[in-house]
Image: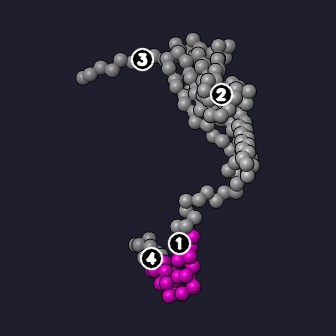
Amino acid sequence: MAIKKMASQDKASKALTETRELMNPFAAFRQEMDKLMDDFFGGFDLRPISSRLDTFTPRIDVVDTDKELRVSAELPGMDEKDIEVSLAGEALTIKGEKKEEKEEKGKDYYRSERSYGSFLRTIPLPSEVDTTKVEASFKKGVLTVNMPKTARAIGGTKKIAVKAE
C-alpha cells in the first residue's frame, strides 16, 4: 500500500513540475530552442576533427572451419609495409597506419589534402592454432591470415548424433 502511495506522489510531483515549466515562458522557450538545435545538428558529427581523423577501424571477418581459422581484414588504400600482424597467446593482433596524401595543381589553383589514421584490432581466438604454420597474405587491399588448428583442437571436437524419438 505504501509503494502505491509513493508512486502516486511521484506522478503528482512530476505533473506539477511539468505544469510549472509550461507556465514559465522562458522554460518553454528554452525547450523549443533545445528541440530546434537537436533537430538541426542531429545529422552532424560534432566530435572534434582530431578525434575523427586519427582512427580507422577495418572490417574483419573470422571464419572457423574444421581445420583452420581464417581472419580477413579490409584495408583499402594500404600497403603491406604499413601492416603488422602478431600472434600472442590466444589472440591475433592486426595493427597499422593509413596515410594518404593528394596533391592537385591546375592553372588557377593548387589543392593538397592529407589524412592519417591508425588502428589496432585484437581478435580472441576460439581454439588453439599451430603457430609454426600461420600464414598471412595481402592482396587488393584485403589481409588474410590462415591459422591451422592444432591436432588437439581438431581432435577435441566430437560430433554427437541426434536421435528422433
Instruction: Describe the element under mark 3 as helix, strand or loop.
Output: loop
Amino acid type of the residue tagged 1 in the rendering: Lys
Residue sitting at 73 percent across and 45 percent down? 105
Amino acid type of the residue tagged 3 in the rendering: Lys
Q: Quadrant of the C terminus?
A: top left
Is mark 4 in CB contact (under 8 Å) with mark 3?
no
Q: Of callouts 2 and 3, which one flags the residue occurring earlier in the amino acid sequence?
A: 2
Where, by quadrant of the figure, is residue 118 drawn? top right
Circle 3 crowding by C-alpha within 10 Å: few under 14, some 14–19, many from 20: few
Q: Nearer the viewer, mark 2 or mark 3?
A: 2
Magenta residues, start to end:
11-37
Is mark 1 in CB contact (under 8 Å) with mark 3?
no
Which residue carries the number 4 mark? Answer: 11
Residue sitting at 33 percent across and 20 percent down? 162
The circle on residue 159 is 3
Amino acid type of the residue tagged 2 in the rendering: Leu
Which residue carries the number 2 mark? Answer: 92
Q: Of callouts 4 and 3, which one flags the residue occurring earlier in the amino acid sequence?
A: 4
Q: Nearer the viewer, mark 1 or mark 2?
A: 1
Q: Nearer the viewer, mark 4 or mark 2?
A: 2
